[in-house]
Image (cartoon, helix red, strand yellow):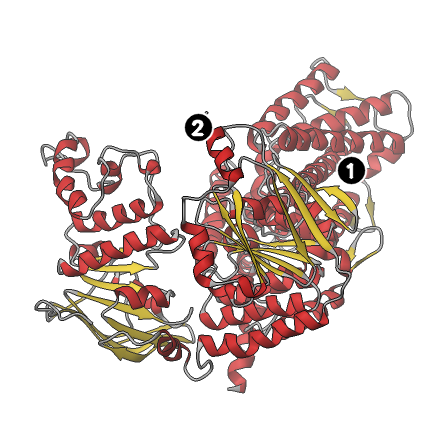
Amino acid sequence: MQSMKSSSTLLEIADISKKFHAIQALDSVSLKLKTHTITALIGENGAGKSTLVKILAGYYQPDSGLIKLDGKPVCLQNVVYAQSQGISVIHQVPAFAPDLSVVDNIFLGRELSKNLKGRALSKHDRSAEIKNLKPLLSQYGANFKPEVRMGQLKAYQQRLVGIIRALVFSARILIMDEPTAALPLEERELLLSRIRQLRDDGYCILYVSHHMDEIEKVADEVAALRNGKLVGYTDTVPTQDRMIEMMTGDRLRSLSEMYDNEMHDFKRKARTDSDPIRTSYSFSLTPPFSSSSSTLVQNPVALTVKAGELVVLTGIVGSGAKDIAEAMYGMRTDWQVVLSKDETSFRLRNPKDAIKHSIGYLSDDRLGEAMISDFSIRENITISMLEKVSRYLIRHIVLRDEKRTAGELCKNLKVKMHSIEQTITDLSGGNQQKVMLARWLFAEVGMLILNEPTQGVDVMAKRDVIRLLRELTAMGGACIIATNDPEEFLHIADRVLVMRKGIIVGDFSGSAIKHSDVFQSMLIHENLGLTGRRHERKRSE
Amino acid sequence: MKENVRNNTFFIRLRAVDNIGLYGVFIAIIIFFSFASPYFFTLRNFMDILRQSTFVLVAALGMTVVIITAGIDLSVGSVIGLSAGVTSVVLLQGAPTSVAVIAGLTIGIICGFINGIIITKLGVTDLITTLSTLSIFRGILFMMTHGIPFQAFARPDFSMLGRGSIGPVPFPIIIAAGIFLILRYILGRTILGRHIFAVGSNSTAAILSGISVSKNKIAVYMISGFTAAASGIMLASRLSSVPPDLGQGYEMSVIAAVVIGGTSLFGGSGSVLGTVIGSLMVAIIGNGLILLNVNPFYQYVINGVIIILAVSFNNAKRKRT
């Protein structure tokens, strides 16, 4: 896209293959990475992106094929060696010690010392470290002191530190794995501009991402993997639809087409089928009255979700949308949560209470908060409502019923698997997410709260998940999706609530849902409503 | 293609047999000693091995359930002593055997309940809690006995528990088998068992699935207290005496049996069948070495080595998946 300033091939991958047991993760992939160039690597989950990254990082050895650096073949036998050759992987969420300073984090394990003899006991030379670091920090717009604690930095600044750490140790090839994941929109832009600056400074960047819009903004070349094969390689950036086509083959023509046809059908169905007298779930959420609480939400929040309605609750990171979603499910034990349903009010003290009142919750942290990794697919599906398949006083589980119901759900949701007895960790991210949804279908909840339901899910599974949510609401279920990135849900939402600084500041419904309005409402800091101003004053007191 | 699919399901099934390595080693050890000593592979020797291992085994069965929730119960040795002490006191008062046994078991369950309450409601870690109650329960037994063993409480029907047999099968083995079957059923086929595994595997996910972690934790410590008490009562019957240090140091053998049996200290996986094999393995190696005239002091070293091997094997398995 840009005319390169003397871009030359730095790293060449030729016919790389890698097999894990019976699965061909990479099938003779060839790729050239150039200086002054951002090459985007795209592909669905399981297409082989991470295998390729790990091979370049020296974590895996290829079964066959050749890697050439500066035109000479190299064997990246381990991670340390790959780093010494200037190949550095910047991970999605870099691991930092939040209580150490920026400079200590950057030099962690590779501290400079005053005398080089007897490394372990030699004196730590912090001033030399800071001297090395300062020019890089200012060059890449890191306007903070190297002595500042890591934990005090904003998310995007921490990502920047991750990149600078690689630069300090003379990396030439930067491999970035979803560098903007979980960043708020504004910070995302800042980081992307720094990545472009790195490109202009001559670095060779491999940019792995699911975000087509970002790739459009930063990439110069695009390489697409599908089932371990390189299926597309362009030295310009194609349109988003074209990129999706490259990744998915002919299964899915384009994202917009999918929304236009299917979603409109669902939407219309939901409108016509809906019952005039609908159950509604009204929440009144009161955050704890203390300044030390872990949430930005300071004032009580009230919101209502009707049966058959799909509500998107959004706002930039830290707006409180996630806190509200968790509080609605009774996860915040220090909040006071009252649910009014069918003209009766209940207090929700914990998730158990919420489930009792037919509310389910899908966490954004699948591995940490939702999946039970030691369990099979079947056990993961039935765990929140085992009463449904149990009998007698001793609560004997009727395995036959359990297997049948779980099996049917998996079939309906098209979970790709061999058997429901496989452990859940065998599945890909998208299929795991389907199983997590199946858990609540099994429990037959009336309302589902979802926190970032498409995070870490590939395009095809994303489509299935979104379609499923639409189906659920069409059948009379209520859904509320909390997300920082509402883009992919706007097409299907009945209502969009926008939060800013712990207050609901925007409420759009039906045809009033416009992309630009929603984003404007999320981002603009002026024109706070009356409640907002009061809230601001209270905080400053 | 078709063959491929069949192959896959075969491997899934094979992987489902978690402890395949453990069973292999177990059988190898039996074969080894059978060839090494002519006295080893006899019914009488096997009954001896079983009888020796039952007291540890019974407590280890309850411990397995605790460890599946990623907990640990260091107080089992003291619960063994205390419940044996209470049973003998009740017997000495002239109460019927059944009353004495129920009293002993109840004390065990209460001890477990106390452990569970301290861990869940006061938020003290399981290690510190049960280390403290190990000392507390033992202290109570010392106060009860004034340091002098309880004796002369055994009546014929009480002696039956630890010494009697039905046909060739010693009575303690029947009790152990009963407890084994009950726990296997609870873990495998009831909601309680499923919840216990869920809590051990991912307690946050368990809470978000509407499972009460504290209720399940209290339940597993009560189960452990119950099995420790059963073991203590059988020991009292077998020895016809309750010295104040009865059961001291048992926690080590009990935990070792569970760990060798493949139950992970990280929680979420494990089985009582593994624990049976684990405790038999320790007993068989001890028995075999005696038959081979190996210096008995080596036994301690060998037991330690087995634990390290078992856990490192387990870790390797964890990494692979």
Residue at position x 20%, y 46% from top?
A141
Q: Which residue is mark 1?
A: B162
Q: Which residue is mark 2?
A: A540
Q: Is residue A119 above or below residue B291?
A: above
Tell which of A88 and B49 is nearer to you: A88
Residue at position x 51%, y 44% from top?
A320
Q: Residue B70: give x, y in percent of width and height.
A: 57, 43
SS for callout 1: helix
Tell which of A96 and A199 is nearer to you: A199
Q: What amino acid type should be assigned to the residue bearing mark 1?
A: Gly
Chain of the residue where label 1 is placed in the rendered structure: B
The quadrant in which residue A100 appears is top left
**Does residue B314 appear anywhere in the picture?**
yes
**Does residue B46 appear anywhere in the picture?**
no
Q: What amino acid type should be assigned to the residue bearing mark 2?
A: Ser
The quadrant in which residue A360 appears is bottom right
User: How packed is label 1: few (under 14 Cα within 10 Å), some, or many (20 or more)?
Assistant: many
Front label number (2 vs 1): 2
Chain of the residue where label 2 is placed in the rendered structure: A
Left or right: A368, with A211 as reference point = right
Same chain for marks 2 and 1? no
Tell which of B64 and A417 is nearer to you: A417
Q: Residue B201: give x, y in percent of width and height.
A: 57, 50
Left or right: A213, with A138 as reference point = right
